[in-house]
Image (cartoon, rainbow, N blue to C red):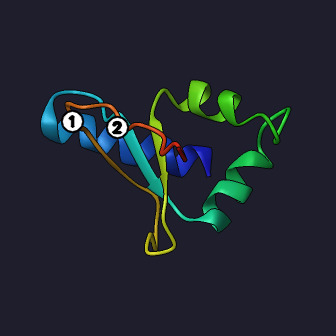
């Protein structure tokens, strides 16, 4: 999974001239990715390793990347 994400990110950077900052994936992709890490339950480690925000969506057939000028904000229940 890491190599796939790396390749998609590199392709994005070559095409646009800058690195992506957002990764779209579904829960199955996330679980596969977490199994490649030393501490799979540390979500901060996942985002830190990738250097991107994660958007989890069941509509994501394959992991894909994008760049947004405004950082994502975690929804907070009031």
The relative height of residue 58 versus residue 12 in the rendered view (above or below) is: below
CB-based contact (under 8 Å), mark 2 and mark 1: yes
Q: Residue 77 carries which label?
A: none
Q: How many labels does the image show?
A: 2
Q: Neighbour class for label 2 at 10 Å: few (<14), some, many (≥20)? A: some
Label 1, residues with CA under 10 Å away: few <14, some 14-19, many ≥20 = few
Determine whether the residue tagged by mark 1 lies in a helix, strand or loop: helix
The CA distance from mark 2 to mark 1 is 6 Å
* Above/below status of 44 relative to 53: above
Question: Left or right of 8: which side holds 66?
Answer: left
Q: Which residue in the protein does label 1 denote? A: 14
Position of residue 16 measured from the top left corner of the image (x, y, whole percent): 14, 37
In the rendered image, which residue does mark 2 sit on?
10
Query: In screen coordinates, is 39 left or right of 45?
Result: right
User: Regarding mark 2 in the picture, which secondary structure is present there?
Assistant: helix
Residue furthest out toward the left = 16
Depth check, front residue: 44 or 66: 44
What residue is at 25 percent from the left and 34 percent from the top? 13
Q: Which residue lies at the image location 65% right of the left edge and 55% below the top edge?
A: 30
Left or right: residue 35 compared with residue 43: right
Q: How far from the left and from the top, in percent, is residue 15?
A: 16, 41
Q: Where is residue 66 in the image (x, y as percent from the top left)?
A: 28, 45
Who's the residue at 50% across and 59% down the image? 25
Residue lying furthest front: 78
- The image quadrant that residue 11 belongs to is top left
Note whether 57 is above or below 39 in the view shown. Answer: below
**Residue 22 position by quadrant:** top left
Question: Residue 24 or 73: which is nearer the viewer?
Answer: 73
**Which residue is at 15% across, 29% downward?**
17
**Residue 63, percent across and down?**
46, 59
């Amino acid at each position: 999974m890491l190599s796939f994400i790396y390749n998609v990110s590199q392709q994005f950077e070559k095409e646009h001239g800058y690195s992506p900052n957002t990764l779209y994936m579904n829960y199955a992709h996330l679980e596969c990715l977490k199994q490649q890490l030393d501490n799979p339950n540390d979500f901060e480690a996942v985002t830190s390793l990738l250097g991107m925000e994660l958007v989890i969506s069941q509509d994501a057939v394959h992991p894909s990347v994008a760049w947004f000028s405004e950082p994502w904000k975690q929804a907070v229940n009031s």
